Amino acid sequence: MTKLYYSTSEVAEMLDVNVSRIRFYEKKFNLRFKRNGQDRQITQKDIDILRDIILNADKGGLTLKGVKRKISKKSDENKTKNALRAKLLTIRAFLVQTLEDV
């Protein structure tokens, strides 16, 4: 069973980076980790974003500005896909309703 939230130290260990690097990327990329007092509660989705940042910044040779652009582009692509999916579901519902009316 997977956990819902991970601590900063757990995530740092998973991603093989220092805890300070997690905090640095949180600040630079305006990531919004849930907090419990001073402790950060990081979700699997947040870990995936951090992993993407680390791969592009540290190993991909991109600057932080380049990583932000790449992540923003990915986010825009996901928004477009979600909008298209919503339109297709609306069309599908219309077609199903039309078939039932016949």
Image: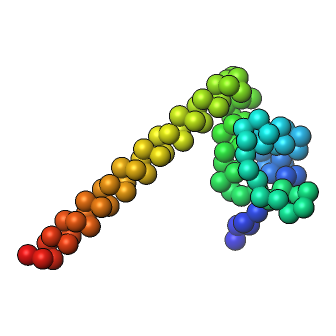
- 1, above or below 30, in the image: below
Q: Quadrant of residue 6?
A: bottom right
Q: Is residue 58 left or right of residue 83?
A: right
Q: Quadrant of residue 71?
A: top right
Which quarter shows the C terminus? Answer: bottom left
Q: In the current view of this chain or complex, which residue is farthest to the left?
A: 102
Colouring convention used in this rendered image of the protein: rainbow
Pick the front one: 86 or 17:
86
From this viewpoint, is residue 17 visible? no
Q: Is residue 12 left or right of residue 31?
A: right
- 95, above or below 85, in the image: below
Q: Position of residue 35 (x, y in %)?
A: 82, 59
Q: Position of residue 30 (x, y in %)?
A: 73, 41
Write the residue at 19% across / 65% down: 95
Q: Quadrant of residue 55?
A: top right
Write the residue at 36% across / 49% down: 84
Which quarter shows the N terminus? Answer: bottom right
Q: Position of residue 89 (x, y in %)?
A: 32, 61
Please state the total of marks drawn on the protein image: 0
From this viewpoint, is residue 67 visible? yes
